[in-house]
Image (cartoon, grey):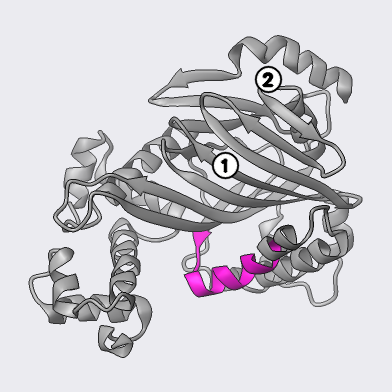
Amino acid sequence: MLDRIANWYHLSKQYFFTYKEGFFNLSFLSNSPEVIMKSFIKMPFVKHNAEEQKINVVNPFVFGESYYAELEEGLWLLHSTITYKNNVSFTPIYDKFLPSDYYCLTFGFIENNFKLNHFESNNVKIINETISFIKPKSDYLHCHFKGSSSKMFLIYFNKDWLAKNILNAPNVKQSTIKLFEKETNNIINYTIKSEIFNKITLPFINSYKENSKTNVLELKKCIYNFLDYFFQNLNDIENFEPKRISVKSTLKINKIENYLMSTIYNKFPGIDFLSEKFNVSPTKLKNDFKSIYNTSIFKYYQAKQMDLSLKYLLRGEYVKDIAAKFNYQNVSKFSNAFKNHHAVLPSHFK
């Protein structure tokens, strides 16, 4: 393994970051979590603390830290907190001479800061809470915009661990078996309600806050609880049908999502407008967006508006003023949209 990592480093060190489509792209060696961490440790501007199983990175593109731990044979957890000083994207590469048999279940927060020319605020924070499932050797793209920050947890497990602990477990669900079938697609992305997401992530966050060294037992408990939640709720994901989407299309959808969040106080601009602005057909735009975010563009946009509206309500602002911020013609339409997302009327918080 170390020889292959050294070979990768020798061939790639001049091209760690390449610029394309408005992003500085880092291609990283991705065969396994061990390969990922050992290859990152060799990169410039990286400091490694072996005792704490931690790496720190500060370079012209990002700054942050990552922790790693092998909790069982074939089961790893990586945890990173990163701030982006430029538009940065990550794509995996795989060494054909090394095994590539790890699945990855990722969850975390991505916070984007938008500077807006708006009467309400010239700066707004939009937080995306996502869960992603990636199969071995998948081709994918993670995009992060300048000024954003992320807190991510990545659970890696290989095929042997999967067979022993999940597929051969009693009463395993058919939806779980289907997820790992060869003919199903390689990547799933979806969002869940903030209150559920916070319950999932809080034990992981607390484990790292309360311990300077890796608490293996506590993290294993967190992972088993999360995996149980994930596999038990596969059927509850709205329109759960994983689809393939190219890296190029993923990049375009990420740019569209970022644009929408920068116009969060406005009315939804419409499919035709977005289609023309980003040079993509309306049908492909709708299909690709749903493949990544598992909901329609309009529902996604409205949900982000309603999440932001709740923050204003909790600050004690009037419903009519909040409705006006988001360009609703009347309070009734705003209240209906709010109830559709939060299951209660805005008056519930007064």
Name which residue lies at 54% across and 32% down: 62
Question: Mark 2: few, some, or many residues within 10 Å (few <14, many ≥20)?
Answer: few
Q: Quick one: 272 or 132, which is closer to the camera?
A: 132
Tell me the SS state at disc 2.
Answer: loop
- Percent across and percent down for residue 303 are 33, 66
Q: Is residue 192 left or right of residue 199?
A: left
Above or below, comparing residue 310 to residue 219 in the picture: below
Numbered label tally: 2
Q: Earlier in the sequence, mark 2 or mark 1?
A: 2
Residue 234 in percent (x, y) is at: 61, 68
Amino acid carrying mark 1 in the image: Ile
Q: Mark 1 falls on what kind of element?
A: strand
For the question of whether residue 184 can be seen, the reply is no
**C-alpha separation, residue under disc 2 versus residue under disc 1:** 16 Å
Q: Residue furthest left?
A: 329
- Quadrant showing the C terminus: bottom left
Q: Residue at x 74, y 17 (%)?
A: 8
Q: Which image quarter is the N terminus in?
A: top right
Q: Amino acid at mark 2?
A: Pro
Q: Given contact means CB atoms under 8 Å apart, are the residues at marks 2 and 1 in contact? A: no
Left or right? Give the position of 338 relative to 329.
Answer: right
User: Label 2 belongs to which residue?
Assistant: 44
Stretch of the chain drawn in magenta: 190-204
Q: Position of residue 171 (x, y in %)?
A: 80, 77
Residue at 48% over, 41% down: 245
Quarter where residue 181 is shown: bottom right
Mark seen at residue 280: none
Identify the residue position indicated by label 1 in the image. Answer: 82
Q: Is residue 200 magenta?
A: yes
